[in-house]
Image (spheres, rainbow, N blue to C red):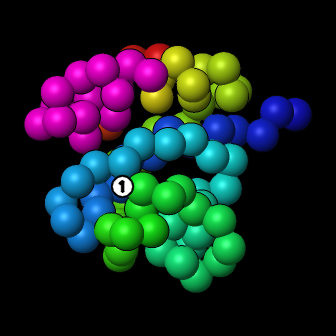
Amino acid sequence: MNTPWHVYLLRCADDSLYCGITTDMARRLAQHNGLLPGGARYTRARRPVRLEACRTCADRSQALRLEARIKKIPRRQKSLFLRTASL
């Protein structure tokens, strides 16, 4: 059985958005907030971060494609798009 992948959108303390993918949302959120080692350089300077939206995908390839689509759309539409986009 394949591990599900998640495409997520974080809202940073400076109100910017960060999009990424993971197989373990709780671990990744803890990394972005500095509770565990790891996390993106972008979010280190913008803590704390909170989960804005998350979408489950069947595999890594699907998650990467959705992440790329999200990064191309205007900021105002990202959260809504992630919650409603058909895969």
In the image, residue 11 sits, relative to residue 72, either above or below, namely below
In the image, residue 43 sits, relative to residue 30, either above or below, namely above
Was residue 70 drawn as part of the magenta stretch in this picture? yes
What residue is shown at x 65% (from left), y 77% (from top)?
Answer: 36
- The image shows residue 18 at horizontal and vertical percentages of 37, 48
Considering every residue shown, the one lying at the far left of the view is: 76
Note whether residue 49 is visible. yes
Element type where label 1 sits in the image: strand
Q: How crowded is mark 1: few (under 14 residues within 10 Å), some or many (20 or more)?
A: many
What residue is shown at x 36% (from left), y 55% (from top)?
Answer: 10
What residue is shown at x 57% (from left), y 25% (from top)?
Answer: 64
* Highlighted magenta segment, given as a residue range: 68-82
Determine whether, in the image, residue 79 is placed left or right of residue 70.
left
Note whether residue 84 is visible. no
Q: Examine the image and state in which quarter residue 26 appears.
A: bottom right
- The image shows residue 53 at horizontal and vertical percentages of 35, 49
Q: Which amino acid, mark 1?
A: Leu
- The image shows residue 70 at horizontal and vertical percentages of 35, 27
The residue beneath circle 1 is 10
**85 and 43: which is toward the camera:** 43
Was residue 47 drawn as part of the magenta stretch in this picture? no
Q: Main secondary structure of the magenta part?
A: helix
What residue is shown at x 28% (from left), y 58% (from top)?
Answer: 11
Considering every residue shown, the one lying at the far right of the view is: 1
Q: Examine the image and state in which quarter residue 82 appears.
A: top left
Determine whether, in the image, residue 85 is placed left or right of residue 21.
left
